[in-house]
Image (spheres, helix red, strand yellow):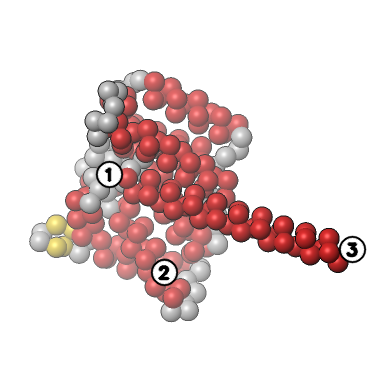
Amino acid sequence: MTAWAFSFMFPFLLVTALLQGVAARCGKDLRGRGPALACALIAAAVVVIPVKELPLARWLISFNANFSIPLTALLFSSVVKTSFGIRLLDSTSLVTCWGFSLIAGVALYPMALGLGQWDPYSAGWGFSWLFVLMFFLTGILLFMKNRFAVVLTAAILAYNFRLLESTNLWDYLVDPFLVVVSCIGLGWNLGVRFKTRGVRKAQGMRRGRSDA
């Protein structure tokens, strides 16, 4: 029952983010408690609309059985930033999340599809090296004051409470949509960095010429 109820969380956040995007395109400012509450109420009403005797939110399960905790955290952070201007995940934690998700996806999905003799997905069932790895990684990120550590902690807690309709830890850490989002995020981040370096280099050349 808990997993069934939690399955409405990601669709709810997704609809909220879409409403915020549409409002922004129309020039509307949705910052503040009032607009945030209005978006939340509309999103809540949308996700429970019955379609063939099944709530609209549950239809997303046909596209992806489990939306991971990091993906949910990214969406939640985006909604909160738009509504209240608060950045729950800073640029460092975002890059860490994208990098972790991409590495996890590359390590997990090809092997799970039979492209290797070793299937790391099996490590998600019960206690294994995956749990030890997540423990040490979370500890290192906490020591570095990286906010992604909170996301990993939330994923482990969600696994313990079985908030997703899966008993495999991997499903709480990564999913195909998160890998796609991570590829886009890392690509965008690299593009911005290269562009910034190019601008700085051009400015440096101009200053050198002016000094000469």
Residue type, mark 2 in image: Gly
Residue type, mark 3 in image: Ala
Query: Do we see residue 91 in this rendering?
Result: yes
User: Could you say where residue 132 lies in the image, as x and y percent from the top left?
Assistant: 43, 22
| Quarter of the rendering occupied by the N terminus | top left
Could you say whether the residue bearing mark 1 is in a helix, strand or loop?
A: loop
- Counting every numbered tag in the picture gives 3
Could you say whether the residue bearing mark 3 is in a helix, strand or loop?
A: loop
User: Could you say where residue 73 lies in the image, as x and y percent from the top left?
Assistant: 43, 48
Q: Earlier in the sequence, mark 1 or mark 2?
A: 2
| Quarter of the rendering occupied by the C terminus | bottom right
Query: What residue is pinned by disc 3?
Result: 212
Query: What residue is pinned by disc 1?
Result: 66
Query: What residue is pinned by disc 2?
Result: 21
Is 119 in front, or is 169? 119
Query: Do we see residue 2 in this rendering?
Result: no
Rounded to the nearest angstrom, the CA distance separating label 2 from label 3 is: 49 Å
Residue in view at x 54 percent, y 53 percent: 189
Rounded to the nearest angstrom, the CA distance separating label 3 from label 1 is: 61 Å
